[in-house]
């Protein structure tokens, strides 16, 4: 039977996370670390210690914004953003919901948007998310302001190679 560490490494399919020597550069650069219950360095340590349930139930894995500052700063190129993606997917497969309100709904809306066009269309993403969350009007004024300033386009370009996008979704399973 595989350890939690082995499962995570296998799914990351890149630099093994045991290459982390806990210098904490990832945490120092993470824009979301202040909001996380466990910083990125601590999540790696918890994985190494086999604390599967605690990691998968953690709000931290849902707060990562995948900005990749962590991998940019890591002297050993440990891909923490990819690790967080893997952990979110593992949590979904185990039926463990996100602690943060509506984060899983946003995650699902984001992936559905990518599946639809291969790229993000912000207005379509927000409509999908707003319908899933039931929070229809809380930031409508901001959305209108962004549209007026040209920050949101109603039509976004589609990916030319949608077959590749479909293959990715087929390999990774349901959203």
Image: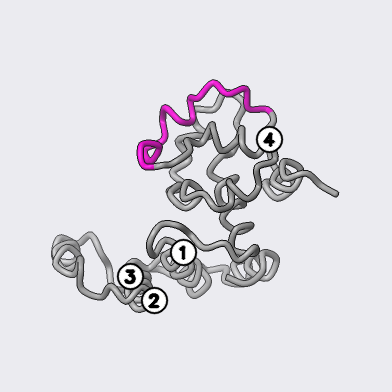
Q: Are marks 2 and 1 in contact (CB under 8 Å)?
A: no
Classed neighbour count for the residue bearing mark 4: other residues with Cα under 10 Å, few (<14), some (14–19), many (≥20): few
Is 20 in the magenta? yes
Q: Secondary structure at mark 4?
A: loop
Q: Can you say whether 173 is above or below 44 in the image?
A: below
Task: Indicate the position of residue 175 as horizontal and vertical percent values.
Answer: 57, 70
Residue 21 sits in quarter: top right
Q: Which mark is residue 104?
A: 1
Which of the two labelled residues, at mark 3 and mark 4, occupies the earlier sequence position?
A: 4
- Residues 152 and 171: in front is 171
- Residue with the mark numbered 4: 49
- Residue at which label 3 appears: 126
Q: CA distance from mark 3 to mark 4?
A: 38 Å
Q: In terms of image quadrants, where is residue 127?
A: bottom left
**Residue wearing tag 2:** 132
In the figure, 169 relative to 24: above or below? below
Q: Which residue is depicted at the point 60% across and 66% down?
A: 95
Q: CA distance from mark 4 to mark 1?
A: 26 Å
Q: Secondary structure at mark 1?
A: helix
């Amino acid at each position: 039977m595989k350890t939690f560490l082995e499962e995570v490494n296998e799914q990351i399919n890149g630099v093994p996370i045991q290459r982390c020597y806990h210098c904490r550069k990832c945490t120092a650069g993470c824009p979301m670390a202040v909001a996380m219950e466990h910083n990125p360095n601590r999540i790696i340590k918890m994985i190494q210690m086999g604390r599967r349930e605690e990691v998968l139930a953690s709000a931290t894995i849902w707060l990562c914004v995948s900005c990749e500052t962590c991998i940019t700063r890591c002297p050993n190129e440990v891909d923490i953003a990819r690790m967080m993606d893997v952990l979110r997917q593992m949590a979904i497969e185990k039926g463990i919901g996100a602690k943060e309100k509506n984060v899983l709904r946003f995650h699902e809306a984001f992936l559905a948007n990518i599946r639809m066009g291969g790229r993000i269309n912000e207005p379509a993403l927000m409509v999908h998310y707003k319908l899933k969350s039931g929070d229809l009007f809380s930031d409508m004024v901001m959305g209108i302001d962004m549209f007026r300033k040209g920050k949101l386009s109603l039509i976004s370009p589609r990916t030319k190679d949608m077959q590749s996008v479909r293959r990715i979704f087929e390999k990774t399973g349901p959203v």
